[in-house]
Amino acid sequence: MKRMLIIVLALLVVSSVAFAGKMLPDAKFSTEPYTPMGSRDYTEGFEGAFPPAGWTQGITNPNFTWHQYSPGGEGTYCANCFYDPALVPQFETLCFSHTLVVDELYLSFLAMSSYYWGVDPYQNYDIYVTVDGGVVWSFRADGTTNNYVWDPYGVDLATFGFVAGQTVEICFVYEGSDGAQAGFDAIKVGEVYVPPPPPEGDVCETALPIPSGDFSIDGSNVGFANDYPLVYTDSCTGYSASGLDVVYYTNLEVDDVFTVTMDTVGDWDDSIYLITDCADPQYSCVAGDDAYPDMSTFTYTATVAGTYYLIVSAYSSGVGEYTIFGFNGGSTTPVETASWGSIKALYR
């Protein structure tokens, strides 16, 4: 029965605005934060009139074309397009003209679409960006595997031969039939953005230690990335996990017991899981839980000595503060040097 209420409410909302949005059974929107560019020669977030001043729409399907929609990827609103359940073809464009400036030839935006309906197993639609009629970015060609997640993308227009002083037409396009929902937000033209280094605990290489014995750790996933997702097929939690994740670690001997519970501020559907291989979180997961809306918990007794990584994440859009607490029967000392007995065991 998990998320049944959310699914029912989502259906009611969609029907109330007279649009149809095709989503996977476990799809949600992400509220992944987007770091602004250092300089913005131009920006549009679709927070005011729609289409924005100076923008034009090319409409082939008046009932299912670009429109202002909430929630957005940044701020309250975005540009959104639903699919037509009557399967009337759609070729919907949203365009503006802009004169490029020296050292500010980088197009940045957030985009959200469906891998399931647009790439694999179906290629029913695509969203893409054109500059003066030439495609410079495509969801299908980008290689993303996310469904309905706001992800940041960028295009260096200079690599396509565009130069400062040139006035170009930039268009955001939805094309297909029997596709799914899609959106754009946070359109920016400016200098190339160089992101700051990731915070400690963002990846396994900088994982944070879990103290031995009883522990309680306060944290936040704000500013982190989704580095170790799960898909619902064969998931050790029983659900997918596409939230922003923080990584902790401990070293366990055989029969060491590890117990953990996660409590979030705001009940944002936490997800926690213990993995042994950061290159393969899906199939190296040895224990996990995704309780709704909060207090995911599990206990694991180690069957193999080694380093274990606790991934603190969310089902989808959870962002904010949390506490993890429990008992760690291991330590942050590498297993092979934890004791003389361990060292002798290496030579048996």
Image (cartoon, grey):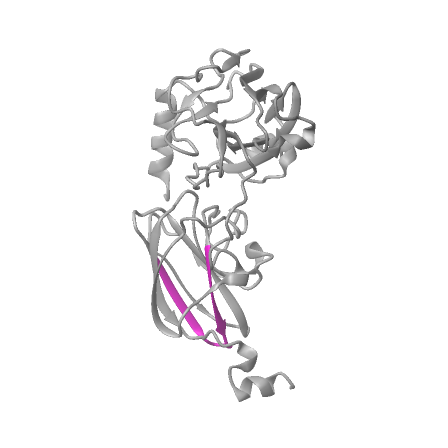
Query: Which quadrant does the C terminus fall into?
Result: bottom right
Q: Nearer the viewer, residue 184 or 200?
A: 200
In the image shown, does 265 or 28 lie closer to the viewer?
265
- Give the residue drawn at x 51%, y 53%: 197
- At horizontal 60% and vertical 85% (from top left) the residue drawn is 345
- The N terminus lies in quadrant: top left
- How many labels were placed on the picture? 0
Residue 269 x %, y %: 37, 47
State whether residue 213 is above or below residue 10. Answer: below
Asked if residue 83 is positioned above or below residue 231 in the image, the reply reads above
24 or 71: which is nearer to us? Answer: 71
- For the record, the magenta segment spans 246-262
Q: Is residue 91 above or below residue 244?
A: above
Q: Residue at x 55, y 20 (%)?
A: 98
Residue 118 magenta: no
Q: Position of residue 57 (x, y in %)?
A: 51, 13
Q: Is residue 101 left or right of residue 150?
A: right
Spot the residue most to the left.
Answer: 266
Asked whether, in this view, residue 143 is left or right of residue 309, the answer is right
Residue 7 in sight from this viewpoint: yes
Tell me where residue 142 appears, x and y as whole percent.
Answer: 63, 36
Q: Position of residue 177 (x, y in %)?
A: 58, 20
State the image quarter where residue 20 is shown.
top left
Q: Nearer the viewer, residue 255 or 215?
A: 215
Q: Is residue 338 above or below residue 120?
A: below
The secondary structure that most of the magenta stretch takes on is strand
Residue 258 on the magenta segment: yes
Q: Is residue 125 visible?
A: no
